[in-house]
Amino acid sequence: MSDKIITTQIHGITPDEFKESILKDIREELKKLSLNFQPQIPSEYVTRKELSKILKVSVITLADWEKKGVIKSYRIGNLVRYKRAELDHALVELNKTSK
């Protein structure tokens, strides 16, 4: 790497005005980003038993829906869990196929 010193000169603006201009642009960009920022909410998981009560179906029906790809399960060892956020989508899909 070269030991050259590069100098940039700006005319017609003071260093403080230049600094304030940069900060203003950064603040505006951060404000735009903050409008689109959504904090990530941790997924809530429910058990087979809980889901069968919520949907008022049997555990066997849930297993059948899993095999058909209607609902997606997540396994942790021997435990089976379902993401609560995915349930609405699964119900919509189920209603489409039943029509």
Image (spheres, rainbow, N blue to C red):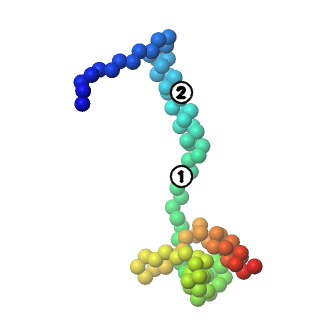
* Residue 48 in the image, given as x and y percentages of width and height: 55, 81
> Dots 2 and 1: beta carbons under 8 Å?
no
Report the number of discs: 2
Q: Is residue 5 left or right of residue 30?
A: left
Q: Residues within 10 Å of mark 2 (few under 14, many from 20)?
A: few
Q: Taking the image as drawn, is residue 13 in sight? A: yes
Residue ID for mark 2: 24
Circle 1 SS class: loop
Q: Secondary structure at mark 2?
A: helix
The answer to whether 32 is drawn above or below residue 25 in the figure is below
Quadrant of the rendered structure where residue 2 is?
Answer: top left
Q: Is residue 23 above or below residue 58?
A: above
Residue 1 point in image, percent of width and height: 24, 30
For mark 1, what is the residue? 39
* Label 1 Cα neighbours within 10 Å, binned few <14 / some 14-19 / many ≥20: few
Residue 72 vs residue 79, the one in the foreground: 72
Quadrant location of residue 69?
A: bottom right
Amino acid bearing label 1 = Pro
Q: Which residue is pictured at 59% across the width and 86% down the height? A: 64
Place residue 82 in its image quadrant.
bottom right
| Image quarter hosting the C terminus | bottom right
The picture places residue 55, in percent across and down from the top left corner, at: 65, 79
Q: Residue furthest bottom?
A: 60
Q: Mark 2 vs mark 1: which is more N-terminal?
A: 2
At x 55% / y 70%, what residue is drawn? 83
Q: Residue furthest front?
A: 2
Residue at horizontal 71%, vertical 75%? 96
- In the rendered image, residue 28, in percent from the top left (x then y), is placed at 56, 33
Is residue 50 at all visible to an observer of this figure?
no
The dot on residue 2 is none
